[in-house]
Image: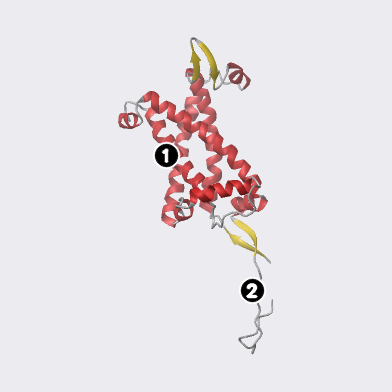
Amino acid sequence: MKVIKEKHPLIMRWTHWVNFPILTIMIWSGMLIYWANDEYKITLFGHTYFSFFPQWFYDKLHIPHRLAEGMAFHFLFMWFFALNGILYVMYTIISGEWRELVPQKKSFKEAWLVLLHDLHIRKMAPPQNKYNAAQRIAYTTIIVMGFGSLITGLAIYKPVQFYYLTWLCGGYHLARIFHFALTIGYVLFFMIHVVQVILAGWNNFRSVISGFEVINEKPKPIIEPNTPADEKPIQ
């Protein structure tokens, strides 16, 4: 028997979907800024063997000479990114949803079993509540990454005013490296997240939009009146 069950409250869905366009704009505007000082590459004896973004990449996306535009968008939308993240974290704490998100002791072991199940190597997936072990680890990690982006971003944005944050990050250049690495992490997370959504199926995706999911429940056994206790109920 199919039953409609509430899964994701409105505020969880709101912060989830709002975060996607904000983060997309942040990454795009960050690329416009990064172009002005593209220094992360592998160079040996004056020869560059690897560069994250070659010149053809910049030219194809029309990134060059848009530094001021990138800074304007980046410094504006970073506040929306921060406020949206703070709203999400505050809600999970106040509502108690953090209990469903924070990894448990067994989560790291079960996450491996979830991966084997997703790869169709293992038939049975570990038991789960609202989120499985892999989701717990991934969603908690992305929250920590968001906090890290905010700290390193402020350290780069105002290294004098927020000198204590810059010092905490190991200096301006190290803070910039951390900020760049976290951005790469967001892109990788997004790619894996999309694959996981496809593997999970339409029902899971629908629940993130509507807040409800359709589940199959076994009908409860019907016990006829005046039935002796030792007789089996009718299924």
Residue 112, percent from left and from top: 55, 47
- For the image, the number of numbered tags is 2
Of residues 188 and 34, the one drawn nearer to the viewer in this rendering? 188
Along the line of sight, which residue is nearer the eye, 45 or 212?
A: 45
Residue ranking furthest to the left: 164
Name the amino acid, label 1. Phe
Residue ID at (39%, 31%): 154
Tell me the element at label 1: helix
For image coordinates 55% across by 38% down, the residue present is 189
Dividing the picture into quadrants, the one containing residue 163 is top left
Q: In which quarter of the image is the C terminus?
A: bottom right
Colour option used: secondary structure
Quadrant where the N terminus sits is: bottom right
Placement of 74 over or under 125, stated as above or below: above
> Which label lies toward us, 1 or 2?
2
User: Is 211 left, or right, of 44 in this rendering?
Assistant: right
Point out the tag, 1 or 2, that comes first from the N-terminus. Answer: 1
Q: How crowded is mark 1: few (under 14 residues within 10 Å), some or many (20 or more)?
A: some
> Which quadrant of the structure image shows residue 214?
bottom right
Name the residue carrying label 2: 220
Question: Whole-percent x and y of residue 207?
Answer: 61, 53
Q: Which residue is drawn at 50% across and 49% down?
A: 109
Q: Name the residue under label 1.
A: 147
Residue 46 rendering spot, x and y as whole percentages: 49, 9
Checking the image for residue 189, the label placed there is none
- The single residue placed furthest to the top in the displayed view is 46
Residue 105 picture location, percent across and down: 44, 52
Camera sees residue 216: yes
Amino acid found under the numbered disc labelled 2: Lys
Element at badge 2? Answer: loop
Residue 84 seen: no
42 up-or-down from 25: above or below: above
